[in-house]
Image: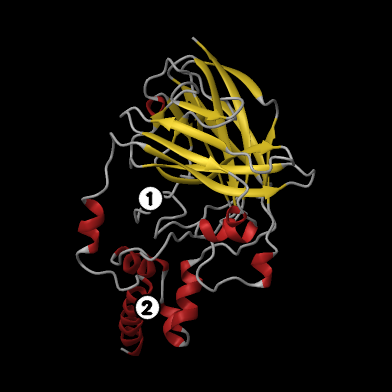
Amino acid sequence: MKSDKLVKITALLLTVVLTFLSNFATADEPYYYAKNTYSSGQHTEVAYEGWRVNDDGTISLTFGYFNHNWQEELDIPVGENNFFSQGEADRGQPTHFLPRRNRFTFDVIVPSDFGDSELVWEVTSPNGLTRKAYGTLREDYKIDNIIIMSETGSLGAGSSDAKIRANIPPVAELIGDEARTARVGQPLRFQTRVTDDGVPEPFDPMRSIRLLLGGAASVFATPEMVRNMMMMRPPLKPTVAKNNGLFLSWNVYRAPETVAAVQDVVHFDPPQIKPWEDTRPSANSPWSWLWIPPELPEDGIHEVSVSFDEPGTYLLWGRADDGGLYHDQYLTINVTP
């Protein structure tokens, strides 16, 4: 009897705790957000994230984007609808745009004497809307690791400490050649070695709940109970929030212009964790309320299989992300009929 009573008390306490964590969201908020979101047909915003000085004196201008669609992945080849000015039009920008907000997607390296110059990224979406991002060295756009971790949602308000401030990015190493050949319909397997310093500490809802509950009640908090309670509560609303934990995700970065719907012809196995801010509760994304970091291979080597339904040259983008910082790798695959 005493045990049953403790279980009931634990469930009640979990409800109170998770209600608090949900930031007291009001009933009409979900409807407001739902009626202003779209699965397809919308444009992408382009974003200038900021700049930082590299060890060799050059400067990295960092860009990202916000595809307003929740499902449609836009394909905009380099050219009149996707280019940089001044100078070279092709600065390594993506031509395949994943859904929603994608922060710190790529860098453009400029010389140390860039000074008051300006680099403009202009993108016109399939629906005809044009957006521009202006890369400058304005002081208020200067970024560092703390700002990156804060902007991606890895750091909450007032949650920084000496350990996380010393965080260094993970390292992703593609094993084998950076350019490979495959045939249509035949899976290509490749491996990536990922190493990290273990910072920040991976998100563990059980640990968090037990710390909040404390005492005997924490013993009766099971993973199933915690997950069920979390599913009944809306996600945090004040700002972007990310569950920390190391993961690797491979996605399409560029694809042949002849392929109309890239997301339908490129297949990854296993399905990749989303590197974009999918905040829906059950999404396979670190920004999801219920997402838990994956188990990592003991040797740090991640194996992925990819197959293609259409021929052409594809550029894949792999991001190792520890929750706060990241490291990218690229793989070119020439797909023959």
Label 1's element? loop
Point out which mark residue 3 bears. Answer: none
Residue farthest toward the top in the current orientation of the protein: 337
Looking at the rendered structure, the kind of residue marked 2 is: Val
Point out which mark residue 17 bears. Answer: 2
Q: Residues within 10 Å of mark 1 (few under 14, many from 20)?
A: some
Q: Is residue 42 left or right of residue 173?
A: left
In the figure, 334 relative to 25: above or below? above
- Of the 4 image quadrants, the one containing the N terminus is bottom left
Task: Identify the residue at image location x=32%, y=65%.
Answer: 228
The residue pinned by badge 1 equals 283
Pick whichever, 244 or 213, lies toward us: 244
Task: Identify the residue at image location x=67%, y=37%.
Answer: 109
Pick whichever, 305 or 199, lies toward us: 199
Label 2's element? helix
Question: Where does residue 289 sit, x and y in percent of width and height?
Answer: 39, 60
Task: Answer with mark 2 or mark 1, whichever residue precedes in sequence.
Answer: 2
Q: Is residue 289 left or right of residue 332?
A: left
Residue 87 visible in the current orientation: yes
Looking at the rendering, which quadrant does residue 40 occupy?
top left
Looking at the rendered structure, the kind of residue marked 1 is: Ala
